[in-house]
Image (cartoon, helix red, strand yellow):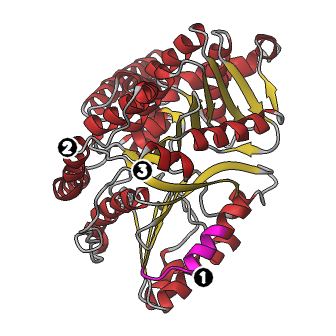
Amino acid sequence: MVWTWDVIRRIIEVLWLINIGFAIWTVFRSRRDIASTWAWLLVLSVFPVVGFIAYLFLGRQLSHDDIFSMREEELRMQNRFLKKQHKLIQKHKLLPEGDRHTKDRMMVNGFLNNSEVPITFDNQVDLFTDGHVKFAHLIDDINHAQTMISLEYYTFYSDELGHRVLHALEKAAQRGVKVRVLYDISGSRGTKPRFFNHLRELGGEAQPFISAPKHWFMTPRMNYHLHRKLVIIDHQLGYIGGFNIGDQYLGLMPKFGYWRDSHLRVRGQAAQMMEIRFAMDWNTSCRRSRLPKFSLDEELANFKIQRPTDEEIESQNLVPMQIVSSGPDNQRFAIRRGYENLISRATKYVYIQSPYLIPEPSILEALVISAHSGVDVRIMIPCKPDHPFVYRATEYYAKYLVNNGVKVYKYDNGFIHAKTLVADGTLSSVGSANMDYRSFSLNFEVNAFSYSHDLAERLRDVYEQDLKKCTQLTPEYFAQQTKWRKFKQYFSRLLSPIL
């Protein structure tokens, strides 16, 4: 064969057509939303070889066995425990009554009916916004644990802070406390399984989450992360929020500077709702590790939700709270729908903090509609990227929202990693879910949705203090950006469903 340019061109055309056909077959053989489908088609078509390698590691969905195991565990917990609590709440009319509780009650019912999530009322809550303070309290609580510690984190680095937390867990295990650690392999890059060997020798248990592949070179799926951050101590004390375990979360990495995050320390029955979430995650992961499963039958056998009076709630600053989780193992999208509900029900203000701003269309339009309706909608994002493509997509959506009446601010005092929403002086959410596609569709997340004037006011006060360290973004700010930067924003936006 004579290798003329005409022959080479025809070979390239045939290979390109084969690539397109294979790309269509690869993407459409899995059930996914339209935006993700087109984003992956773009990647596979424009980058034939690199695109398929990226899809191999990032685009493949969880196996049917994994999803079945997760749903089976969730149904087991719901049938034994959560459904009983749901009936108890309805039977005894435990939901808040009166006109001033209308929005609260509708939010509560939304989670009850969508995800079988009970509401608890007796919670005392501390709010942490600084990593040094949060981890000092956490380590102190671990040191005083008497019966059990369940710890679940996206990131558990083997750095100085990681060793401090691990040492506290080892001392707890040594004195007879039951210690369980669940972590995400991708989020804890660099942390080897042997990091937990001494904890295991002392009777503790540690394992990666089930989304970690058993043999990465055979089933490479790196796109589904355990992004939850939970600690439960002695069945009555829980931690939930955005801080991971690592030195950067103490602001010790020059790249990020001061690390601004939000985390809750909860004493009350909401901690037991966190424990149920942990038990489901732990038990679905035991299928691979062969570690003993977590049984709640004895620990929570006598658990019964009771509602204090409105006067008791207000006088003792008790926080009614629902622990809401979501993930790619189901299609309920509980946290995303909770965000939509909170934004759409606000009549005065909505304050949002998120390191990533890549909202799905429903949330994007809810923000715009609220702003056009006279609601004071404010969003705070970082001033610097930790993931370049994600940050450029964030800038694209920030520009769109600014041009539609939403106030967007960039936090200039380091890196803001908080995932908080607060509205109208009573509704709030603090947890692990960012305002992006990944948190709504790909990651396993958990948030605390609360109905408390006291907590909402604390979150609002913190937000307003943060505003003093921010720059408000304006149409002029975006107009002055270079054409190259604008191109990166538009291109990143096309990939936003898979970032």
Q: Residue at x 46, y 27 (%)?
A: 100
* Majority secondary structure in the magenta region: helix
Q: Are marks 2 and 1 in contact (CB under 8 Å)?
A: no
**Amino acid under disc 1:** His
- Alpha-carbon span between mark 1 and mark 3: 34 Å
Asked whether 429 falls inside the magenta stretch, the response is: no
- Alpha-carbon span between mark 2 and mark 3: 16 Å
Q: Is residue 82 above or below residue 24?
A: below
User: Where is residue 107 drawn, in percent x and y?
Assistant: 39, 32
Residue of label 2 = 91
Q: Is residue 466 above or below residue 489?
A: below
Give the secondary structure at mark 2: helix
Residue of label 3 = 121
N-term mark: 2 or 1 = 2
Which is nearer the eye, 268 or 42? 268
Q: Residue at x 56, y 8 (%)?
A: 373
Magenta region: which residues? 137-147
- Alpha-carbon span between mark 2 and mark 1: 46 Å
N-term mark: 1 or 3 = 3
The mark lying in front, picked from 1 and 3, is: 3
Q: Give the side of residue 111 with respect to residue 359, left or right.
A: left
Q: Alpha-carbon neighbours of circle 2 within 10 Å: few (<14), some, or many (≥20)?
A: few
Residue of label 1 = 167
Give the secondary structure at mark 1: helix
User: Where is residue 201 drawn, in percent x and y?
Assistant: 45, 91
Give the secondary structure at mark 3: strand
